[in-house]
Amino acid sequence: MSAELTREQESSLLKLARRAIENHLGAGGGLKPGPGAPVMKEKRGAFVTLKVDGELRGCIGYPLPVKPLDETIVEMAVAAASQDFRFAPLTPEDFVRTRIEISVLSLPRRVRDIGDVEVGRHGIIVSKGVHRGLLLPQVPLEYGWDRETFLRHGCLKAGLPGDEWKKGAHIEVFEARVFSEKD
């Protein structure tokens, strides 16, 4: 990863994500991040995860560094609240019970040996043809998965058969700095 974030910067990003969702649920206009530390202006991949009463309610992000980190957090917070097709859009009533988690990603790198995939350390991107699926590093820990189960679920998330990781699917790993409002 590039420059590491301080606890204060992590807290600022969490507050920025919360303000972006509040703004979206209220006025509906876009929130623009203000000036910030250079690390906030670096292009970084990141995901915003929303949990209502401890249950997943939205998770969207950019796996690659396409925008400055603060802009990515604003955009992905609103997207997680309103565009994750697996869930109904977040309501103001849900939002008061919502905990925000942010994952700031390193650049992905391809692995040729699945033994190089470390559960709890790595997130994975599984791809083959037009199919692509990503699971963050915290996911297998939350469900108690071993490496093979993690890879199988990565394939399923990509819309591939669960054993496609054995049959030529590309596996990439990345690391993430994960922090949340409960930290």
Image (tube, helix red, strand yellow):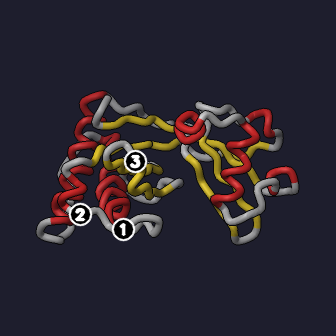
Q: Residue at x 59, y 53 (%)?
A: 134
Image location (x, y in percent) of residue 159? 68, 66
Dot 3: few (<14), some (14–19), or many (≥20) neighbours within 10 Å? few
Image location (x, y in percent) of residue 182? 30, 32
Which residue type does callout 3 highlight? Glu
- Asked if the residues shown at circle 1 and circle 2 are in contact, with their CB atoms under 8 angstroms apart, the answer is yes
In this orientation, which residue lies closer to the viewer: 57 or 132? 57
Q: Residue at x 43, y 36 (%)?
A: 178
Q: Residue at x 69, y 67 (%)?
A: 131
Dot 2: few (<14), some (14–19), or many (≥20) neighbours within 10 Å? few
* Numbered label attached to residue 55: 3
Disc 3 or 2, which lies upstream in sequence?
Answer: 3
- CA gap, disc 1 and disc 2: 9 Å
What residue did someone put label 1 on? Answer: 88
Image location (x, y in percent) of residue 71? 31, 57
Which residue type does callout 2 highlight? Thr
- CA gap, disc 3 and disc 2: 15 Å
Q: Quadrant of residue 115?
A: top right
* Numbered label attached to residue 91: 2
Say what secondary structure mark 2 lies in: loop
Position of 20 with respect to 53 (left or right) is left
